[in-house]
Amino acid sequence: MTVLNGVVLFVVVIIAIIGLICVDNKINYDEILIKKWTKENGEFYFAVTYYIWQLNKKKRAKEIYTQNTILDFEGYKYIITNFGGEFQVTKDGLFFERELRYWGSPLNKIQSDRNTYLTINQYGSGIINIEVNNNEFINEIVNIQEYISNDTYIDEIDKEVMHSFLNKMLTGQAMNKGEVNMAYDTFLKYEPLLSFSLSIVSLFKDLLIK
């Protein structure tokens, strides 16, 4: 290959990569696939693969998968504990293929004694999430949210605290014990709300004694 041919090839590759970067920037990465890889010794990690020109995908993946993100693989839940960095997929793989690696730990499931229609998932560092499997209880939570929104006597900041807790419970998002304590203290400030949401109070007791 002549020097001229080499220069032409280089320019073509650069133009192609710039074009691919432009295409990547136009993609809305609302969902990005993450996989779990298990080594022979039983250790595991999670990874998002991308090509070197997918700068937008890499950025969005880092935004979506952060510390304390809960992942579900084959019916088992895990929590991301830290970001491991950027790696080439394999030693013999394509040089332009990369992956973001994350490390995590499995949950410890705790069945609620007082509320058999939900499961408390306990992770390390006091992180929990809640799985609700009862439509009646879900409807009760929705009714409580409507009550909070419409009650003009509840402080706006307190509304935000309670709504955040209830939304995380409904969607199974991770939360820490500090958030649970804050929500519980907030509920205790409003007697009408407290009597209206006995199931929530019972749930708090389960969460705070674990």
Image (cartoon, helix red, strand yellow):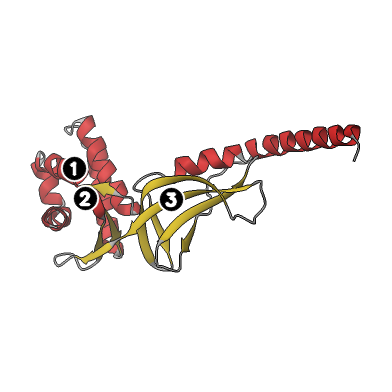
Residue 39 lies, with reference to residue 5, above or below; the image says below
Where residue 18 sits, quadrant-wise, is top right
Residue closer to the observer: 78 or 162: 78
**Mark 2 or mark 3: whose residue is earlier in sequence:** 3
With 210 as the anchor, is 89 left or right in this view? right
The residue to which callout 2 is attached is 126
Query: Mark 3–mark 1 contact, CB under 8 Å?
Result: no
Residue at screen point 62% across, 41% down: 54
- Residue 124 position in % (x across, y down): 25, 53
Label 2 Cα neighbours within 10 Å, binned few <14 / some 14-19 / many ≥20 = few
Mark 3: which amino acid?
Answer: Tyr
Label 1 Cα neighbours within 10 Å, binned few <14 / some 14-19 / many ≥20 = few
Mark 2: which amino acid?
Answer: Gly
Where residue 93 sits, quadrant-wise, is bottom right
Query: Mark 2–mark 1 contact, CB under 8 Å?
Result: yes
**Mark 3 or mark 1: whose residue is earlier in sequence:** 3
Residue 143 can be seen in this image: yes
Residue at screen point 16% across, 40% down: 182
**Quadrant of the image for the N terminus?**
top right
How much space separates mark 2 and mark 3, taking CA atoms?
Answer: 20 Å
Which label sits on residue 102? 3
The residue to which callout 1 is attached is 178
Considering the numbered disc 1 on the image, is that residue within a helix, a strand or a loop?
Answer: helix
